[in-house]
């Protein structure tokens, strides 16, 4: 773990929470291997029992994959918690500064939405750890789903409170600087609502209790639909300002925020369709899932290429990733990598394999996985590199210099 800076006060930004969010996302990337590449017919997700059966079997390659994925989950879960605790502590110090009060009265107040966004990820990480490392947990999971719904409800209330306070201020006073809205940073609020929505959808899809599933479904639809409506508004306003003033260089990374928003929204819609299928008699064909995932992947690819071209033109990577310039917002580079990887796994397994267009464990199957593995490695490298650059405590000699 990094020896992190302490009590940085005015130099802190709520966007540093994206470091903990990225570490939590890294946990999910390793979970995808277990989710789609290990057998767990008795449960919708891998559990302690299903992995124990794999490790006691005779498939050496699958055992190596399982152990590697579990190791990655443990390492990045610890990193997630380490960064989360650091951020909470530093945010408390920051909230006592004049810089914080200035942030609360500017466009940048939306950065506070990074808190509920990250807390929602923490719930997901906790659920993954419980399923994989607690024997027999799935036998009582129906009692845990209501607790998960409650946890996401509290997080959703926290997110709504921050956002409503922000929007009330700008609508009453009109103190929103549209000329400085030349980026998509305001979409952070949509990302937070989407993360809460996809959290609710897990209980809706996996619970066999119709009441639990129905409550999860309704709450998920509430947050996902709110995120969708706000996304249209913020997207139009952001592009309107960018087309007039050009994109803000430091915030150009926000063009990629569409990618994780698409992933959480898409997975929520898929899970809700499964909830309707399993618990409410709505028949869903595999080709429908393939169509949905294809549309979502297409939008992600569009913004991935556009965002990269813009940031390359502005020299963003040379300055904020490899160069000496520092920006807490550069942690936003991690989320698109995680999101593209995760939706890619859904596209291959739910879309292509699920419809019979691709044979699992064939040469083509592994060929399609290669770019996703490369993306995962690049994303994890980016997380460590940016954490070392922005968060690591520098030696006293360097600070003095």
Image: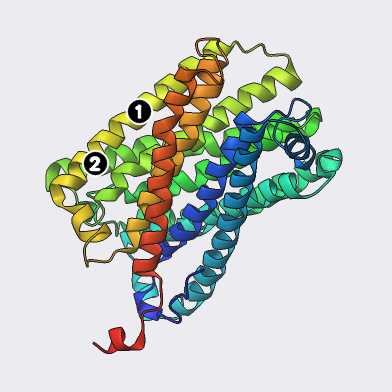
| Label 1: few (<14), some (14–19) or many (≥20) C-alpha neighbours in 10 Å | some
Residue shown at 40% from the left, 73% from the top = 392
Which quadrant of the rendered structure holds the C terminus? bottom left
Residue 299 got which mark? Answer: 1
The vertical placement of 164 against 262, above or below, is: below
- The residue that mark 2 highlights is 308
In the picture, measured across the screen, residue 186 lies left or right of residue 135, that is: left
| Label 2: few (<14), some (14–19) or many (≥20) C-alpha neighbours in 10 Å | some
Does residue 239 appear in the picture of this structure? no
Q: Residue 132, located in which quarter of the rendered image?
A: top right
Proximity of marks 1 and 2: CB atoms separated by less than 8 Å: no
In front: mark 1 or mark 2? 2
Residue 303 at x, y percent in the picture:
30, 34
The vertical placement of 311 against 49, above or below, is: below
In the picture, measured across the screen, residue 13 lies left or right of residue 177, that is: right
The vertical placement of 300 against 113, above or below, is: above
Q: Nearer the viewer, residue 367 or 162?
A: 367
Residue 51 at x, y percent in the picture:
73, 38
Q: Which secondary structure lies at badge 1? A: helix
Residue 356 got which mark? Answer: none
Q: Nearer the viewer, residue 335 or 147?
A: 335
The vertical placement of 246 against 95, above or below, is: above
Residue 63 at x, y percent in the picture:
66, 38
Does residue 79 appear in the picture of this structure? yes
Q: Nearer the viewer, residue 14 or 331?
A: 331
In the picture, measured across the screen, residue 292 lies left or right of residue 56, that is: left
């Amino acid at each position: 773990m990094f020896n992190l800076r302490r009590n940085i006060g005015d130099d802190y930004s709520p966007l540093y929470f994206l470091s903990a969010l990225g570490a939590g996302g890294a946990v999910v990337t390793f979970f995808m291997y277990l989710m789609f590449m290990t057998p767990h017919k008795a449960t919708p997700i891998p559990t302690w029992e299903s992995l124990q059966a794999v490790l006691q079997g005779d498939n050496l390659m699958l055992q190596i994959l399982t152990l590697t994925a579990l190791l990655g989950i443990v390492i990045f879960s610890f990193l997630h918690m380490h960064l989360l605790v650091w951020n909470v502590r530093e945010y408390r110090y920051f909230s006592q500064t004049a810089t914080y009060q200035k942030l609360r009265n500017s466009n940048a107040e939306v950065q506070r939405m990074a808190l509920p966004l990250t807390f929602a990820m923490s719930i997901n990480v906790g659920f993954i750890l419980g399923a994989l490392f607690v024997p027999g947990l799935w036998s009582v999971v129906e009692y845990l789903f209501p607790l998960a719904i409650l946890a996401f409800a509290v997080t959703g209330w926290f997110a709504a409170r921050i956002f409503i306070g922000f929007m009330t201020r700008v609508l009453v006073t009109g103190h929103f600087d549209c000329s400085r809205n030349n980026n998509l940073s305001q979409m952070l609020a949509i990302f937070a609502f989407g993360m809460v929505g996809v959290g609710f959808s897990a209980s809706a899809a996996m619970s066999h209790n119709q009441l639990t599933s129905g409550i999860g479904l309704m709450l998920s639809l509430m947050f996902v639909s709110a995120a969708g409506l706000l996304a249209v508004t913020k997207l139009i306003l952001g592009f309107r300002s960018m087309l007039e003033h050009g994109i803000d260089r430091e915030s150009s990374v926000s063009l990629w925020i569409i990618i994780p928003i698409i992933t959480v929204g898409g997975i929520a819609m898929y899970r809700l369709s499964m909830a309707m299928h399993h618990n409410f008699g709505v028949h869903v064909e595999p080709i429908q899932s393939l169509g949905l995932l294809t549309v979502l992947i297409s939008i992600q690819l569009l913004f991935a290429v556009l965002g990269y071209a813009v940031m390359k033109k502005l020299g963003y990577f040379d300055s904020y990733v490899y160069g000496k310039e520092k920006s807490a917002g550069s942690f936003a580079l991690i989320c698109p990598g995680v999101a593209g990887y995760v939706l890619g796994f859904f596209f291959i397994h739910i879309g292509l394999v699920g419809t019979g267009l691709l044979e699992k464990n064939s040469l083509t199957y592994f060929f399609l996985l290669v770019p996703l593995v490369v993306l995962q490695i690049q994303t994890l490298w980016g997380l460590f590199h940016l954490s070392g650059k922005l968060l690591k405590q520098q030696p006293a000699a360097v600070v003095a210099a």
